[in-house]
Amino acid sequence: MIGRAFRLSLFGESHGRCVGALVEGCPPGVPFDEGLVRADLDRRRPGSAPLVSQRSEPDEFEVLSGVYRGRTTGGPVVMVVWNVDVDSTPYDSVDRVPRPGHADYTARVKYMGFGDPRGGGHLSGRMTAGLVMAGSLAKMVLGVLGVSVAAHLVQVGGVRLDREVEPGEIVRAASSGLWCADPSAARLMEEEILRARSEGDSVGGIVEAVATGVPVGLGEPLLEGLEGEIARLILAIPAAKGVEFGAGFRLAPVRGSEANDQFAVSPDGTLTRLSNNAGGVEGGISNGMPLRLRVAFKPTPSIPTPQRSVDLEEMREVELRVTGRHDPCVAVRAVPAVEAALAVALADHALRWLSWVEWGRSLSSGGG
């Protein structure tokens, strides 16, 4: 489980009966938008486009509890997606011959051989279906507070979208098969993916997410600072290997005079910044600027190109060719998962923040 006010647990296995999410702490009365959940799942589901895994899952979801007459009840919200197109035969030997880049070996040792290896079990990327449903619910909560979250693809292999795009452009990227805000870059990304797949290989990528309308004050430093809490959720997404906020690693070689986000007064008389290198967070606390982050995803480890492995029963080296249905670029379907992780973390901290706001109002009214 993760979170203190908006608490999330994920359950199920890739080739089990279902995968799902349990959310506790969701406030009562939040309008439940089934269309939003459906749209988010459609962006994540396999078989939805030529450039993703051809496992044909409709990803129909079902709400088992926590919603009544179109609104949340305040009780635990349980949502599931039933697994339909399950073919476990390509995984018959992974217990014995682990696939490079996967968790086959570490899971075998960790769970003493009792884990479910089919499709990666509960360590599979399919578990992000539950995360995405929870993220949809989190976005409903954030919508009540005027906060919006969107993500898009900014790099595939060597093809990178270098310009900074506006939040509105990112929202429109949902209509692109690659979820990239720039059509020209999207075409080059598609070529990069197809080239890797034709060569029996895969390619990595980078996903960018932006949240707008985030109030000042979210985050519980030092050990539960906003960046750390968001990163913890994002790095739980299979294949995610790095996250940066704002200018991130680009800040390392510059001077403070270039890195600092200087203050200014906007035309409407409110406080603003002349830049957003911090990505909307300072000292682990949101500063009112758009929260912007990027996530690096490694290339999909399941590839038909021959690789070296070891037969663990005989302890001899063998050549392995991975079969099955896999994404040539996992970053494509990771876009809604990154969006969901950011939304869940923000919803948790927003609900914590509201308790501070109510306390402040009590103090102001003399209740303290």
Image: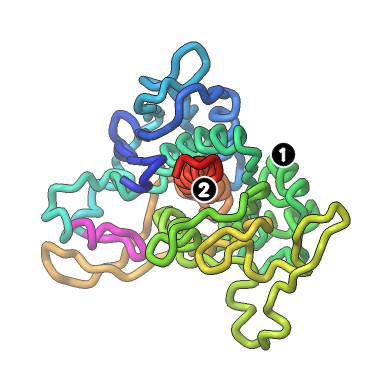
Amino acid type, residue under disc 2 in the picture: Leu
On the rendered structure, is 11 left or right of 330?
left
Mark 1 packing: few (<14 Cα in 10 Å), some, or many (20+)? few
x%, y% of residue 57? 46, 31
* Residue 164 visible to an observer of this rendering: yes
- SS category of the residue bearing label 1: helix
Residue topped by disc 1: 175
Residue at x 44%, y 64% (from the top left corner): 221
Residue at x 85%, y 52% (from the top left corner): 268
Mark 2 packing: few (<14 Cα in 10 Å), some, or many (20+)? many
Q: Earlier in the sequence, mark 2 or mark 1?
A: 1
Residue at x 43%, y 32% (from the top left corner): 26
Q: Which quadrant is the C terminus positioned in?
A: top left
Residue topped by disc 2: 346
* Residue 84 visible to an observer of this rendering: no
On the rendered structure, is 169 left or right of 343?
right
Amino acid type, residue under disc 1 in the picture: Ser
Pick the residue in front: 87 or 140. Answer: 140
Residue at x 36%, y 20% (from the top left corner): 64
x%, y% of residue 147? 63, 42
x%, y% of residue 281? 58, 63
x%, y% of residue 87? 34, 36
Magenta segment boundaries in residue numbering? 97-108
